[in-house]
Image (cartoon, rainbow, N blue to C red):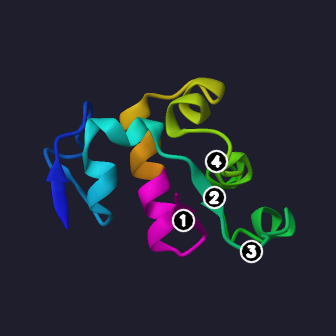
Amino acid sequence: MFMVPTKEPKKGKDYRFNLEKLAQETANSLKPQRIGAIPKLAVLLGLLSPQFYEIYELCDGNRDINSIATELKQEPMQMRIAIDKLIKSKMVQVQ
């Protein structure tokens, strides 16, 4: 795992990325790609938060992390953290 300070650390802790590529500033140009298909029903059943589902849906392999962050009005660092969590859950991969 790789430790990178976030702009808003939770309870004084830095986020530890599982994927080394996402720990670097250049990671904003990576293009995440969905793995498989997750139905909207997963959100309704509480298996996935609406925020993560929205991010998951935008991971089409054509958009980079910066454009996803811009579209959802989030900071790129926070988006890299969310993408890292989706990668850890094996829902997304990075090209």
Q: Tag count in the figure?
A: 4
Judge depth for marks 2 and 4 and give the one in front.
2
Vertical position of residue 3 compared to residue 12: above or below: below
* Marks 2 and 4 close (CB-CB < 8 Å): no
State the mark number for residue 33: 2
Vertical position of residue 76 compared to residue 23: above or below: above
Identity, as a three-letter code, of the amino acid under mark 3: Gly
* Marks 1 and 4 close (CB-CB < 8 Å): no
Q: Nearer the viewer, residue 21 or 41?
A: 21
Under tag 2, what secondary structure?
Answer: strand
State the mark number for residue 93: 1
Q: CA distance from mark 2 to mark 4?
A: 11 Å
**The N terminus - image quarter:** bottom left
Under tag 4, what secondary structure?
Answer: helix
Identity, as a three-letter code, of the amino acid under mark 1: Gln
Q: CA distance from mark 1 to mark 2?
A: 5 Å
Point 63% across, 30% down: residue: 72
Identity, as a three-letter code, of the amino acid under mark 2: Gln
Under tag 3, what secondary structure?
Answer: loop
Judge depth for marks 3 and 4 and give the one in front.
3
Point out residue 73 in the picture as x, y percentages from the top left corner: 58, 24
* Quarter of image, res 67: top right
Mark 1 vs mark 4: which is more N-terminal? Answer: 4
Identify residue for label 4.
55
Q: Which residues are magenta?
A: 83-95
* Marks 3 and 4 close (CB-CB < 8 Å): no
Q: CA distance from mark 3 to mark 1?
A: 11 Å
